[in-house]
Image: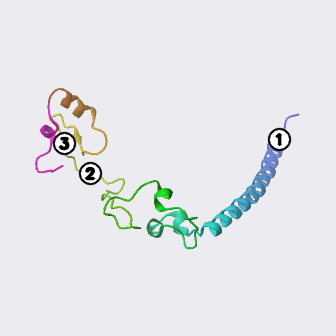
Amino acid sequence: MAKTVDQIRQQIAKLQLQEQALLAKEIDGVVAKIRIAVAHYGLTPEHIFGGKAASKTKAAPGRKTHGVKAEARTGSKPSKGAIAGSTPARHASVPRGTKLAAKYKDDAGNSWTGRGSQPRWLRAAIESGRSLEDFLIRGIRS
């Protein structure tokens, strides 16, 4: 027997209510697990959602490191001359989405900023005997 549009709409409404109830129950379980983890590790909103405070803190207050040295936790050794407990110096970076000025350009109008892999046009020109300096835009140092 064919169902009417009204019967199908009633069935959809009933299923949507069931979905909302299941979702609310599932969310309650997830939130409970998150609260346990936050309490255990002493996490802050900055740790979870990002922010300046998260990048400057090594461990949340009260967090146990179980006697493991920073080298073992991070997998890297401090550089020579580094102060114990300090973070290594990093290169200044350009914010994502910012256009960089080209450092290299050819006669056909192709250009390259000098970051990332060399473009095909530049690799082909270098393989044919030209040097990288031939494409350097005057006034720009590498």
Q: Is residue 66 above or below residue 100?
A: below
Q: Which residues, given as a range, are shown in magenta?
A: 130-142
Which numbered disc, 1 or 2, marks the residue closer to the eye?
A: 2
Q: CA distance from mark 3 to mark 2?
A: 12 Å
Amino acid carrying mark 2 in the image: Leu
Q: Label 3: state its secondary structure.
A: strand
Which numbered circle lies on residue 119?
Answer: none
Instruction: Using residue 34 as the reference point, say whether residue 53 is left or right of it.
Output: left
**How far from the left and from the top, in percent, is residue 39?**
64, 69
**How far from the left and from the top, in percent, is residue 64?**
58, 67
Residue furthest toward the left? 138
**How far from the left and from the top, in percent, is residue 94?**
31, 56
Q: Depth check: 132 or 18 in front?
A: 132
Q: Label 1: state its secondary structure.
A: loop
Residue furthest toward the bottom? 61
Residue 117 within the magenta-colored segment of the rendering: no
Q: CA distance from mark 3 to mark 1?
A: 69 Å
Q: Depth check: 104 or 128 in front?
A: 128
- The residue at which mark 3 appears reads as 104
- The residue at which mark 1 appears reads as 4
Nearer the N terminus, badge 1 or badge 2? 1
Amino acid carrying mark 3 in the image: Tyr
Instruction: Using residue 7 as the reference point, say whether residue 37 is left or right of it.
Output: left
Q: CA distance from mark 1 to mark 2?
A: 62 Å
